[in-house]
């Protein structure tokens, strides 16, 4: 039986923590849809644009064998609409978002997975900045 998973993220400067959460998300079902957050959404949220633009970030994520479908996440508030549109059975997020999406439990199962320790896009950017 098909079991559809949906997850969301920026996936900027793609790293091992990103692939691990996507693989673990896929292992919970049979089909994985990924909402890649738009450049504008990131600017609104963090007051800066991602290093890689939304086309390149979507291209990288869609090239992964565990990913079946990619779309642009235009607004954080539209998660309920995306869950319905892509007929997701499970919403998966990293546990940095623990509890934040519990309101979608009326639409689907909501699972928070532990983050991969010791790696983040912010840290990679900071390290790269210090290299002369
Ligand atoms: N992640 C992880 N381990 C890390 C870093 C990230 O498991 N070391 C996970 C995050 O928990 C998230 C996914 O990878 O589930 C994508 O992370 P980000 O690109 O940082 O996504 P974010 O900016 O949190 O965007 O609608 C929600 C947003 O789009 C989430």
Image (cartoon, rainbow, N blue to C red):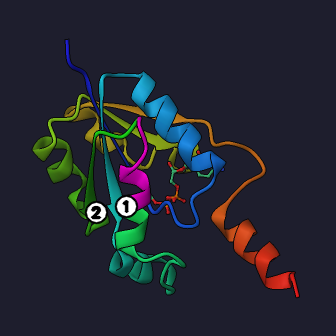
Q: Is residue 66 left or right of residue 114?
A: left
The location of residue 24, given as percent across then percent down, is 51, 30
Residue 132 falls in image quadrant = bottom right
Q: Nearer the viewer, residue 63 or 120?
A: 63
Of residues 86 and 113, the one nearer the viewer is 86
Front disc: 2 or 1: 1
Picture quadrant where residue 72 is located: bottom left
User: Image point 11% across, 46% down: which residue?
Assistant: 85
**Residue found at x 78% / y 77%:** 128
- Depicted 53 relative to depicted 104: above or below: below
Q: Residue furthest left?
A: 85
> Residue 53 lies in magenta, yes or no?
no
Q: Residues within 10 Å of mark 1 (few under 14, many from 20)?
A: few
Q: Position of residue 64 (x, y in %)?
A: 43, 44
Mark 2 surroundings: few (<14), some (14-19) or many (≥20) residues within 10 A = many
Is label 2 in a helix, a strand or a loop?
Answer: strand
What is the x, y in percent for residue 8? 38, 52
Measuring from the top left, give residue 68's x and y in whole percent.
Answer: 29, 39
Q: Earlier in the sequence, mark 2 or mark 1?
A: 1
Task: Indicate whether 100 appears above or below 92.
Answer: below
- Residue identified by numbered label 2: 73
Kindly identify the residue that appears in the image at 43 percent across and 65 percent down: 57
**Residue at image x 73%, y 54%?**
119
- Secondary structure, mark 1, is helix
The magenta span reads 59-65
Q: Nearer the viewer, residue 44 or 13?
A: 13
């Amino acid at each position: 039986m098909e079991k559809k998973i949906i997850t969301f993220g920026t996936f900027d400067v793609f790293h091992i923590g990103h692939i691990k959460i996507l693989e673990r998300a896929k292992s919970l079902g049979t089909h994985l849809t990924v909402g890649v957050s738009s450049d504008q959404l990131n600017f609104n949220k963090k007051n800066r644009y991602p290093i890689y633009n939304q086309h390149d970030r979507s291209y990288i994520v869609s090239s992964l064998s565990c990913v079946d479908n990619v779309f642009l996440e235009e607004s954080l508030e539209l998660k309920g609409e995306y869950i319905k549109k892509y007929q997701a059975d499970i919403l998966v997020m990293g546990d940095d978002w623990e509890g934040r999406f519990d309101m979608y439990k009326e639409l689907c199962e909501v699972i928070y997975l532990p983050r991969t320790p010791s790696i983040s896009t912010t840290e990679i950017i900071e390290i790269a900045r210090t290299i002369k």
